[in-house]
Image (cartoon, rainbow, N blue to C red):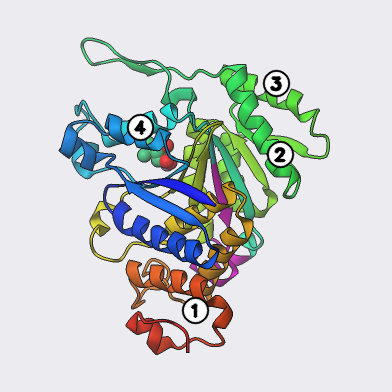
Amino acid sequence: MNLKIAVLAGDGIGPEVTEQAIKTLKAVEEAYNHNFSFTEAPVGAIAIDKTGDPLPDDTLKLCLDSDAVLFGAIGDPKYDNDPSAKVRPEQGLLKLRKSLGLFTNIRPIKAYPTLIERSPLREDRILGTDMVIYRELTGGIYFGEKKLNKKGTTASDLCEYSEYEIERIAHLAFKAARTRKKKLTLVDKANVLETSRLWRKIVTNIGKSYEDVELDFLFVDNAAMQMILNPSQFDVILTENMFGDIISDEGSVIGGSIGLLASASVGDENAMFEPIHGSFPQGAGKDIANPIASILSAAMLLEHFNLHEEAQAINKAVEKALEMKVVTSDLEEDSKYGTEKVGSFIADYIANAEEIINYNQENIDYGQSTII
Ligand code: IPM
Ligand code: MN
């Protein structure tokens, strides 16, 4: 398959983790005879520094002209600590989501058996967790009208949803549930919010066409609690933009590290793949960032184009890395492996998996081929 991939590595650790995802995709390209092209463009704080714009026109154009976007991370402390900043890196990401029409953000959360003891949650609570969050991504309070009065003393953010915006993501979430454990939970705040009541009404209606899927509802405060108390009860969670943002970070503790969580953002025309972690500026350039979330995002990219076997090859290689503890220090305190080595191990495993009979720790350490 020919795929034109736009690479928007962005800020902080974005470039180093994305480099590992590209390395992995190149291994897949080689092993399975595909033809992937990678074109880089600036986004975020780095783009503001260069052009004054967090999403320069050329970057957006490249994304629109590509089959998929591989995104790194966005954000820089110099903006976080300045509430009066007129231009912010995050605006680039939001504009990109909106301009590409990426209305559904898909965030899988899984408890990896090999990492279970890493989670701050008790093993018996998280065992068997395998859920996916369908987060609405281009509507709600993120994109509603924003107001600040002249004196700067009163502000508001409008949360608005239309029937159309709810319907299109609801169908995707029901379809996903059909291929999984056939359970869909709508997370909302229907006891307080008018938008949530609209979500419930529409999702209930759509549910009638998916009778094989069990539909239930949870208020977001209760959902936040249930995710920690009993996360394995969930299959597909469907929710609006801001609730999805919050509960997906919460869900990351189940996996043991936010450095493991990948995501896909899809629309009718475009698709973008990114780790859910931020730019971790304190870790930038130190070769300590966990590249797995970015690498698993690359697997989601392949899955999106129905390259199932290829995506599985990445997932297997990641599981092998976890099993062999070829991981960064967020997962193994005194690990001797950095971002680069973890990426190389995973790429190598994909390229050579069939011939590998055994692994030689020493070779891994030297960053050489892992084949004996
Ligand atoms: C995310 C991030 C973004 C969001 C920020 C960077 C705007 O937290 O992708 O979850 O809130 O959507
Ligand atoms: Mn977030």
Q: Closer to us: mark 4 or mark 1? A: 4
Q: Which of the numbered marks, if any, corresponds to residue 175?
A: 2
- Magenta residues? 106-123
Q: Residue at x 31, y 66 (%)?
A: 288
First-in-chain label (1 vs 3): 3
- Say which of 271 and 48 sits in front: 271
Quadrant in the rendering for residue 128 = bottom right
Residue 137 sits inside the magenta stretch: no
**In the shown orientation, is residue 249 left or right of residue 239?**
left
The answer to whether residue 218 of the structure is visible from this angle is no
Residue type, mark 4 in image: Lys
First-in-chain label (1 vs 2): 2
Assign a secondary structure to mark 4: helix
First-in-chain label (4 vs 2): 4
Tell me whether the residue at label 1 lies in contact with that at label 2, contact meaning CB atoms closer than 8 angstroms: no
The image position of residue 49, as x and y in percent, is 16, 38
Local packing at callout 4 (Cα closer than 10 Å; few below 14, some 14-19, many 20+) is: few
First-in-chain label (4 vs 3): 4
**Residues under labels 4 and 2: Cα distance?**
31 Å
Q: Closer to us: mark 4 or mark 3? A: 4
Residue type, mark 2 in image: Lys
* Residue of label 1: 324
- Say which of 305 and 115 sits in front: 305
Assign a secondary structure to mark 2: helix
**Residues under labels 2 and 3: Cα distance?**
18 Å
